[in-house]
Image (cartoon, grey):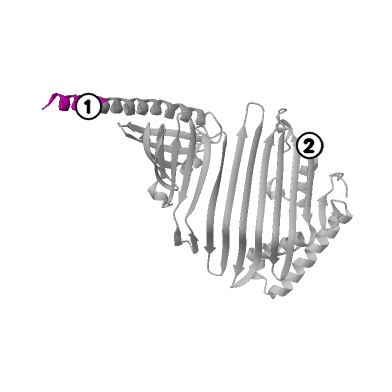
């Protein structure tokens, strides 16, 4: 062998050793950061992450986690909600990243592929790329499923995907999830959701918090016995939660429905708006007991929230749309109840009776000034006093 050949072998051998050492060092750093991230996540309320195993290799590591409610030890019944997760961590500094747009060579710290326990039979996977500044991008992939029946229900959906940009602790993040179609059917009904686009955005600092969730759907529909009952076209729902420097909470919910149909009635350009500001978390009133839930109980809760908590609340509901939707929901709830199942009257008679009852309820609320009429809208009356008759 020539001197040049020996030198080439020495050079390539040195490069191989350096690369191996680099991947080994990155793998060790990743493992340390991995446990540090788990510790920070567990410091927050809501969920507990337990590392069952972490097997580190030169180019790949494998981890098994258990996700459970943080109060699982205090409430044994929540242990059944534990979720088993498997992760494969591919070490950097150079990785053939598996992105939504195909494989791409990237200089990153690692790639993490997350899959759920096979017992769940849910074709959902996550791929996360972590850069050296501890910022990450996660791609969510949900494979298409057709006619997956369970207890009389049948589910089907098209392949869906999402992209989320976040920090390792998932405190600050923004992204989008796109689901082309979801269909749920049983013996006599069918629910459809088409072209769902979900945008999420959360920013948190030491003194403030902002969370925004925007849902857009081209169509939501419900059919029973092959007859269309409900249809909402081009619907946008925005839910915003904020916390200001005074640690006061704010809630802002806006829904816009371009066109809709409730039974035979058609509506257009309907907007629903709920806004609550200046909520002091330390002075939140107790929610009404589910067994005592009633319009008056809800209004009393709102009264205590706005007066004793010094919060500001506004609510606007479109009149005709709200009355029609309340009537239909009340009819379906009655027909599914024990009394409703034994009621032999024709559906048209029952529906007319419930329509009259809803109208009387609304007019009674207006006369008692529980609600105010504001043109084509109903508005909550904030001067309402719980002791008024």
x then y, percent, for residue 138: 48, 41
Q: Is residue 37 above or below residue 82?
A: above
Viewer-closest of 347 and 118: 118
- Dot 2, how many residues are within 10 Å of its Cα: few (below 14), some (14-19), or many (20+)? many
Q: Is residue 70 visible?
A: no
x then y, percent, for residue 168: 49, 32
Whether residue 12 is in magenta: the answer is: yes
Viewer-closest of 338 and 214: 214
Q: Is residue 14 above or below residue 341?
A: above
Label 2, on which residue?
A: 311
x then y, percent, for residue 340: 66, 67
Occupied quadrant, residue 349? bottom right
Whether residue 187 is in magenta: the answer is: no
Instruction: Tell me the tag on residue 13.
Output: 1
Viewer-closest of 23 and 353: 23
Query: Of discs 1 and 2, which sits in the foreground?
Result: 1
Task: Give me the residue at 41% from left, 25% from top.
Answer: 32
Task: Give me the residue at 77% from left, 43% from top.
Answer: 302
């Amino acid at each position: 062998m020539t001197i040049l050949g020996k030198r080439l072998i020495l050079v390539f051998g040195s490069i191989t050793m350096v690369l191996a050492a680099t991947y080994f060092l990155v793998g060790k750093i990743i493992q340390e950061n991995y446990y540090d991230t788990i510790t920070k996540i567990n410091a927050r309320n809501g969920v507990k992450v337990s590392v069952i195993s972490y097997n580190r290799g030169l180019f790949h590591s494998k981890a098994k986690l258990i996700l459970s409610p943080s109060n699982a030890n205090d409430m044994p019944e929540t242990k059944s909600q534990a979720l088993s997760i498997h992760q494969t961590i591919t070490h950097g500094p150079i990785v053939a990243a598996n992105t939504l747009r195909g494989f791409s060579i990237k200089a990153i710290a690692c790639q993490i592929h997350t899959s759920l326990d096979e017992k769940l039979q849910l074709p959902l996977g996550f791929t996360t790329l972590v850069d050296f500044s501890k910022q990450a991008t996660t791609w969510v992939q949900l494979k298409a499923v057709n006619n997956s029946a369970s207890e009389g229900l049948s589910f089907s959906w098209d392949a869906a995907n999402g992209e989320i940009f976040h920090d390792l602790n998932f405190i600050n993040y923004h992204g989008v999830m796109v689901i082309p179609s979801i269909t749920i059917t049983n013996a006599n009904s069918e629910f459809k959701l088409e072209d769902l686009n979900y945008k999420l955005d959360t920013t948190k600092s030491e003194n403030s918090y902002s969370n925004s969730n925007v849902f857009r759907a081209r169509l939501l529909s419900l059919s029973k016995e092959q007859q269309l009952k409900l249809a909402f076209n081009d619907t946008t729902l925005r839910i915003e939660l904020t916390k200001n420097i005074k640690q006061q909470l704010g809630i802002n919910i806006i829904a816009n429905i371009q066109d809709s149909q409730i039974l035979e009635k058609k509506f257009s350009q309907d907007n629903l708006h709920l806004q609550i500001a200046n909520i002091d978390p330390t002075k939140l009133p107790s929610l009404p007991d589910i067994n005592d839930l009633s319009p008056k109980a809800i209004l009393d809760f709102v009264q205590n929230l706005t007066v004793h908590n010094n919060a500001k609340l506004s609510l606007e509901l479109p009149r005709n749309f709200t009355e029609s939707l309340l009537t239909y929901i009340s009819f379906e709830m009655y027909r599914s109840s024990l009394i409703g199942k034994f009621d032999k009257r024709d559906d048209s008679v029952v529906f007319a009776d419930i329509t009259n009852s809803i109208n009387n309820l609304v007019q009674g609320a207006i006369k008692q000034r529980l609600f105010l009429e504001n043109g084509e809208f109903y508005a909550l009356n904030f001067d309402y006093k719980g002791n008024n008759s």
